[in-house]
Amino acid sequence: MKKIITLLAALTASLLLFACVNQKKSPAAQDFVQVSGVQFKKNGKPYFVAGTNMWYAAYLGSPGKVGDRARLAQELDKLKSIGVNNLRVLAVSEKSEINSAVKPATTNGFGNYDESLLQGLDYLLVELAKRDMTVVLYFNNFWQWSGGMTQYMSWIDGQPVQDPNVTNEWEAFMAKTASFYQSEKAQQEYRNTIKKIITRVNTINGKAYLDDATIMSWQLANEPRPGNSKTTAAEKQVYLDWINGTAAFIKSLDPHHLASTGSEGEMGSANDAELFTRAHASSDIDYVTYHMWIRNWSWFDKTKPAETWPSAWQKAQDYMAAHIAIAQSLNKPIVLEEFGLDRDMGAYSIDSTTEYRDKYYREVFALLLANMQKGEASAGYNFWAWNGAGRTTRSNYWWQEGDDFMGDPPQEEQGMYGVFDTDTSTIAIIKAFNENINTLMKK
Ligand code: IFL
């Protein structure tokens, strides 16, 4: 009998030890941002995204030549001080020869990765965790400024990328880029890259990315569109299959983190709201994303602000309401993860005023706050974008290799939409909204 009791005690002790070790290894689900109906939750409390876009944040974290860890710390401290709790960041870029693409790149041909840029991502995750911030990481880009889908296709067919900034042939560019969804080779390589990132172990803190709750969401791509304005029904189906297949692949590797599309909404879905809805219907897509670009979409004319503002703002309100309603119908949260406006009269200079931008931020925030307070589907935002301490010395405002990184990517004039650390009026508006969001998170 004594022997049996000793044996049982030993067994219980080893079971307990096993449970403890296991608990240490497996991440607690509640540490991760989770979805609960139309809201996010973290650590059992409501979680709202009070974010910015900072595509280059992992570049700054690199121990290599392009890195600037001191600047990264300065930017994160500043963002934290104004209540920003989330960054939307480019995880992987592809090496491109065109002028409007960033250099260097994470991928220098299929399977050929720049380890120092990946270590930049490691470093970023560590620094974000220190500040209790989360990150949305996107794996690809519909636009050429980071190489993106069009670079994949160029590697496959051997044809040089036709830079639409030069040719002005945006329709042709979009059609070529969207061929990415149909290419078996591209999809194989894309999945290899996704797997490479998701299964990475952080070289700085030794943590598996899989276990890192700093990562809020894996995002398929920045602004993936189904094609150009002539997208066919068959192409739309290919696009949906790509979204559903990729999201399922991500979940098969990593069931803990959220997955999202990076879609702009109806305007980036061949003007097809039904397609947008279907693109967010899969249970592997955890929440809905949309972007809003009132000047890019010609709702607002930066040279005629007073005349065009009223109708632009009406369209913006309708756009927001329609997308929030879609999220509501899918019973998922929705994040306005990109929006922005030019400085007054479309100036790029850091000294120019931002009256209309400030107005736009104020109005968007008021609408979002009202929706959040009602407990509806709006679950956060990321303004586009954080320029912070970045500066250009170029009189034409175009980025060149070696220049400071800014929220405005190399495909656009530096200073166009990004918020500088000296933009005190805009920053005060952001801070005030984030304080309101913070109050909601304490409830
Ligand atoms: O810089 C652009 C970025 O590629 C994007 N959406 C719009 C931004 C501003 O034009 O994702």
Image: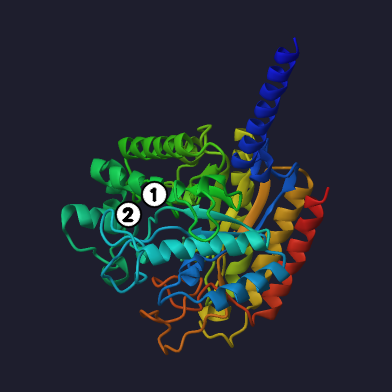
Q: Vertical placement of 385 versus 192: above or below?
A: below
Query: Disc 2 versus disc 1: distance between alpha carbons?
Result: 17 Å
Q: Residue furthest left?
A: 158
| Residue depicted at x 54% and y 63% | 124
| Residue depicted at x 77% and y 67% | 432
Task: Give the class, few, some or many, for how many residues have Cα within 10 Å of label 2's Cα (few <14, many ≥20).
Answer: many
**Tag 2 near tag 1, CB within 8 Å:** no
x, y (%) of residue 42? 70, 45
Q: Secondary structure at mark 1?
A: helix
x, y (%) of residue 147? 33, 62
> Could you tell me if residue 375 is visible in this image?
yes
x, y (%) of residue 367? 71, 55
**Which numbered tag is attached to residue 149?**
2
x, y (%) of residue 208? 51, 48
- Residue tagged by mark 1? 196
Identify which amino acid the numbered label 1 is placed on: Lys
Q: Secondary structure at mark 2?
A: helix
Q: Quadrant of residue 382?
A: bottom right
User: Between residues 126 and 401, which one lies in front from this camera angle?
Assistant: 126
Q: Vertical placement of 38 versus 369: above or below?
A: above
Q: Residue furthest front?
A: 2
| Residue depicted at x 47% and y 65% | 120
